[in-house]
Image (cartoon, rainbow, N blue to C red):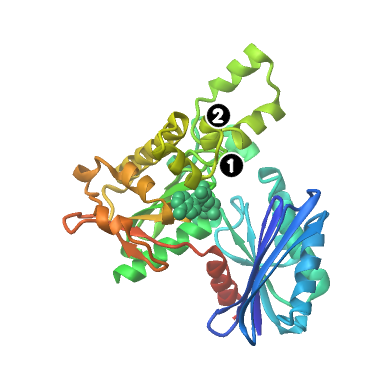
Amino acid sequence: MKILVMNSGSSSLKFQLFNKEGLTVVASGLIGAIGEPLGLVSIRYLDGKGHEQHIELKDRIVDHRDAIEIMMKLFQEKQILSDVTQLAGVGHRVVHGGEAFHEPTLVTNDVLTEIHKLTPLAPLHNPVNITGIEVVMEKVPCVPQVAVFDTAFHQSIPEHAYLYALPYSLYKEQRVRRYGFHGTSHAFVSKAAAEYLGKPYEDLKCITLHLGNGASAAAIDHGICVDTSMGFTPLEGLVMGTRCGDLDPAILFYLVREIGMDINEMDTLLNKKSGLKGICGNNDMRSISKLAEAGDRQALLAFHIFCYRIKKYIGSYLAVLGGADCLIFTGGIGENAVSVRATCLAGLENLGLTLDPQKNNNRSDAIMEIQSDSSPCKILVVPTNEELEIAHQTLALIG
Ligand code: AMP
């Protein structure tokens, strides 16, 4: 029997198929550029000969329904899952669970209705997550499905940290508050760190930094998330690939008055044209690091703005937690960018964080400790695996 995990983005579908027994990966893939003139299909799977890879460019993949059809057809063609009755369950990453969902939830019609109601809070993501659930319901109605919400891990954040200093009625009537995102990743790496350190999760005080194209920080106190940097939407907080992160909202009034910018232009500006890309024209940290080393001033500036924001969040979350047992780096940048880790931790020795430059240079697919022997706070690099976490949660619920 197999467990399928689907992780739909606004124009992509990532999927992973696991053996129910031991949750070993049978196949993983990406169907990308959905809705664009040329789509991309990529899958790695196990067959009798070991790992096989199949990559193809496709004429326009119309929508997520189309993408799921392609995925199912591939499963059959490659004999990865020739019979859908072999599916024991399907886990979906659902971006927004609002205040309704505090934990992974078995999908029923009522649950689906609730997720629909949350669409205004995540207009690009919840509809494609819903499509995934509905297509599976149509094709294999008997297979149990589990919704794993990106926001759920942050539902423990206390009121004084999730409320904005806006009229309270905006919270009560319009649901305006901090929700936080990347919850599955923050949960996965913090639990993995506790296990690695041999500490009960309920005793762990840690700061998690998920640094990828999207980036967020979380403060976890005795295994409970007490604050996170993303807010009402994934735009707040750290500097990201193309997103600005924290901003003085009055900049928007100024742009409206001075150059007549409209709402759609603002949305594109802050979500797609800002962050690393806005500062140096590039949103790939690998390229930015190389350009910065070669003396490119804008790339160096983007790099420093990115690291400085992270440093400020580390400082504030140390204050929130009253000190931490460990700091965790994860995500494409957090797991790989040695210079980012070194730069955002420079000067934090008096706060209990001392990096060992040699250990920081090491590479590993497993958890790595990179603090010096004298550092009271452990500094860990923990590879994230959201799909595995979703598979675990799915298995836990379907039994
Ligand atoms: P993610 O969204 O988690 O896939 O992370 C994507 C980001 O990780 C991009 O900015 C990549 O440039 C960055 N990244 C991946 N590998 C490396 C590396 N070896 N060094 C620096 N940045 C990296």
Q: Residue at x 58, y 16 (%)?
A: 254
Q: Secondary structure at mark 2?
A: loop
Please name the residue shown 63% across and 12% down the image. 258
In the picture, measured across the screen, residue 216 lies left or right of residue 307, that is: right
Between residue 191 and residue 209, name the one nearer to us.
209
Q: Position of residue 121 (x, y in %)?
A: 66, 44
Query: Mark 1 Cα within 10 Å, few/some/many (few <14, many 20+)?
Result: some
Amino acid type, callout 2: Pro
Which amino acid type corresponds to the residue marked 1 in the rendered image? Answer: Thr
Reading the image, the residue beneath label 1 is 233
Q: Is residue 286 or residue 143 the one in the foreground?
A: 286
Judged left or right of residue 93, residue 280 is left
Residue 127 in sight: yes
Which secondary structure, mark 1? loop
The residue lying toward the viewer, choosing from 52 and 209, is 52
In the image, residue 78 above or below residue 321:
below
- For the image, the number of numbered tags is 2
List x then y, in percent, for residue 160: 43, 40
- Check the image and report above or below for 213 versus 145: above
Q: CA distance from mark 1 to mark 2?
A: 18 Å
Residue 326 visible in rendering: no
Query: Which residue lies at the image location 61% right of the left edge and 18% below the top edge?
Result: 255
